[in-house]
Structure formats: structure tokens, C-alpha cells
Image: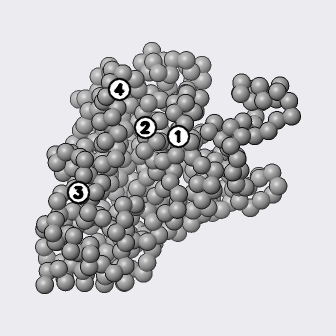
Amino acid sequence: MQFNTKLLHGKTSRGYASREMLPPISQVSAFRYESMEELEKVFAHKSMGYAYTRIGNPTIAAFEQRISELEGGVGAVCCSSGMSAIASALLAVCGSGDEIITCSGLYGGTIELLHDLEKLGIHTVYTAEMNGDSIRPFINERTKVVFGELIANPSLKVMDVAGTAAAAHEAGIPLFVDATTATPYLARSLSMGADAVIHSTSKYLNGGGNSIGGIIVDGGKFKWDADKHTALSDYKKYGPMAFSVRLRNDIWENIGGCMAPMNAFLNYIGTDTLGLRMERICDNADKLARALYEIEGIKVNYLTLPDHPYNKIAKEELRGLGGGILSFRAGSKERAFKIIDSLKYAMIASNIGDLRTLVIHPASTLYNKTAVEEMNAAGVYEDTVRVSVGIEDAEDLVEDFVQAVKSVSR
């Protein structure tokens, strides 16, 4: 099946108990059993079933299975948010004294999370790029995972997934990829060598801006060494599935960052149109970027522009598409604010991946607690405007942004 057909007719889109066309919403806290013996078997994982929604729920499971199928994984775990998903994935393999290798161009919230992990004794090493040559010099006996964004938000650095994975695997280290901004429509990171893929489902997977969530998809192929990854030592008997079992039975379950059943349902139905939305969003973003590129005094950052430093790898990894995020530098913070305030259609909001075009000044919002050096490394400056392009008519978006920029110039 091709992408859109798989969304609607894949193996995880059927088989519901009462022949529903969509997964029923199991909006309950707990599940009733006829005998204590039955419930005991469920808790001991000797019998299939659900006991408590923090641990498992059929609506949530339906969404997990759908994204796992799209990404080509062996299983997935839904979380309460994208940040919860990143935290859970990293904590499942790291402990005090361990190190994470990542790229300097991360999303502001992720940078703040890594600072919090420092307080737990988990150190982060930053590289300028995310490829094999960049990470090799930083790998040591304490390195437990390489983590990065496939398309960094909003710097738009693109990870060389295959090269990064090869270097990590040489040292017996897994690669975790945050593919939120790419989605499985643009790229399937597991097929390129990643070992786990993470999404903030609140963004493009959901599409409607109506529910928060996150998900971790396990590729199920990494050969875990319990002597190296001591956090997984109790689960070495599960082999390649050790990460998934440790994640679900320990970190995720104990921290309690589960997704709500209603959010799982909203995310599920949102993915029905993922392929159509991403096709339109990428086309709109390309047209808007090229229109802004022609305006003197505006420096545009978008992957399909021929002089973009990541244009070549974007063509190779992302099907030649640029995704839904672009940014531009207005010349000053004051000018950036005036341009944003002059827009008619774009909404001022902090989300991305919505049906509607969203715009924000990231330096004063998303990165307001981030050091200037870290902010600049993420492609954010005092005059940066970030745009999450929606599905409006491209002609209207171009006209709106061009008039806003030119009105401020006048």
C-alpha cells in the first residue's frame, strides 16, 4: 500500500470488537473483571487485557499500533506530550553518570529538559552537526544514546540519519530520532537506521490543534548490551525488545505520563488526512519561502531554497520536500513584531503543525529561558520570525506575508 491507502486500510485500521470503522473511545479509568484470578494474570502479563488506563487502554493502543505501522516499528508507547515522550525514552536508557550526544540546534523545550537531566547526573554533549563524523569524537564509555531532531525546529538543520546511525552502532549505541517536524510522510527514520522514533503528536500527526500527546516507536532491531546499558539489565532476556519492555513496564508506567483516551482518539482521526495535509503544507511553504526570498532585506530559511546548506540532504532523505516550517530574519525585534502584527491570516500561536498558519517570535517566547549562545545555535535570533505553514490557499498566504513585510518597510 502507498501512504494514504495504508492510513485508511492498513492492518491497524480494522478489527475492532463491534465492527466499528474507528476505534471506540474507552473513556474509563479502570476495567472490570469477573474474577480475581483473571486480573492477576493481566497484571502478571500472562493474559491479554487492560486493568488501568495509566498502564494501558484499547483506544490508546489503537493509536500506538497505527503510528507503529506507519513508521515500520515493532511497537509504540503513547505519552501525555512530546516532552514526556522524549524524557521517557532517554530515562529508559540513561542513569546518573551517563552521557547523551545531541545537536546544538534543538527545540527550546528539549534544551530545557536536557538541563533538568543534568541535575540527575545525566550529561549532554552537543555537536554542531548531526552526522557520523561529528559524533564520533564525542563517543566514550559513558555515552548511552545519540539523540537528535530529523529536521531541527526552527534552525532546519537536517540529520544525516544513516551516517549518524552507522557511527553510533559502531560503538554499540542506539540512535533516537525526534521526527515530529518530518512525520512518516516525509521520512521513515527507522528504515534509514534509527532505533527509535519520537513524535509530539500534538503537531502534524494530529493536525487540528485539539489535543496534546507524544509517542515513542521502537524499531526492535538494536542489539542491547546489558553490561553497557545497565538500565536495561533486568530486561536482557527480551533481547531487541528490552527497550520497549523497560519503557512500558518501568519508566513510562511509573512516571505516569500516559495519553488520555480522548486525546488518542483525536490524534487517531487526525492522522487520517496526514498525507494530504503534508502534501499541501509543503507546497504552500515552498511557495511562501520563494516569495519572501525575493524581498530585499529579508533572509529566509527554508530547505527547498537552492542555496540552503541542507538542500542536498533534504532531497535525499525528505523526498525533496521541505516540511511545514520556515523562518526569516526581519532585521530587528521591533520590525519582527510589526510584521507579525500586520498579518491578516496567520495566527499568533506557539504550536506548529496546525491546519492554520501560525506565526511566532521564538526568541521572546519559546527561547525566553535559553542562553543566547544556545538560542543562536538553534537558528533563533532577536529578529527571527518562525512560521508554521497551514493549508490555506497559497496565493492568500503569499499576499498576506508580502503585504505585511512591505508595509513595515514603508
Give how far apart the Cα atoms at labels 1 and 4 are.
19 Å
Observer-side mark, 1 or 2, equals: 1
Q: Disc 1 designates what residue?
A: 257
In the picture, which quadrant includes the C terminus?
A: bottom left
Q: Position of residue 282 (x, y in %)?
A: 40, 68
Q: Is residue 159 visible?
A: no
Give how far apart the Cα atoms at labels 1 and 2 are.
10 Å
User: Is 363 in front, or is 234?
Assistant: 363
Q: Amino acid at mark 2?
A: Ala
Q: Amino acid at mark 3?
A: Ala
Dot placed on the residue nearer the N-terminal end, 1 or 2: 2
Residue 38 in which image quadrant:
top right
Image-based side of 47 in relation to 161, left or right: right
Considering the numbered disc 2 on the image, is that residue within a helix, a strand or a loop?
helix
Q: Amino acid at mark 4?
A: Leu
- Please name the residue shown 23% across and 29% down the image: 137
Q: Disc 3 designates what residue?
A: 363
Q: Disc 2 designates what residue?
A: 87
Q: Position of residue 231 (x, y in %)?
A: 47, 21
Single out the residue that lies furthest toward the right.
Answer: 34
Dot placed on the residue nearer the N-terminal end, 3 or 1: 1
- Please name the residue shown 47% across and 36% down the image: 88
Q: Amino acid at mark 1?
A: Gly
Q: Disc 4 designates what residue?
A: 120
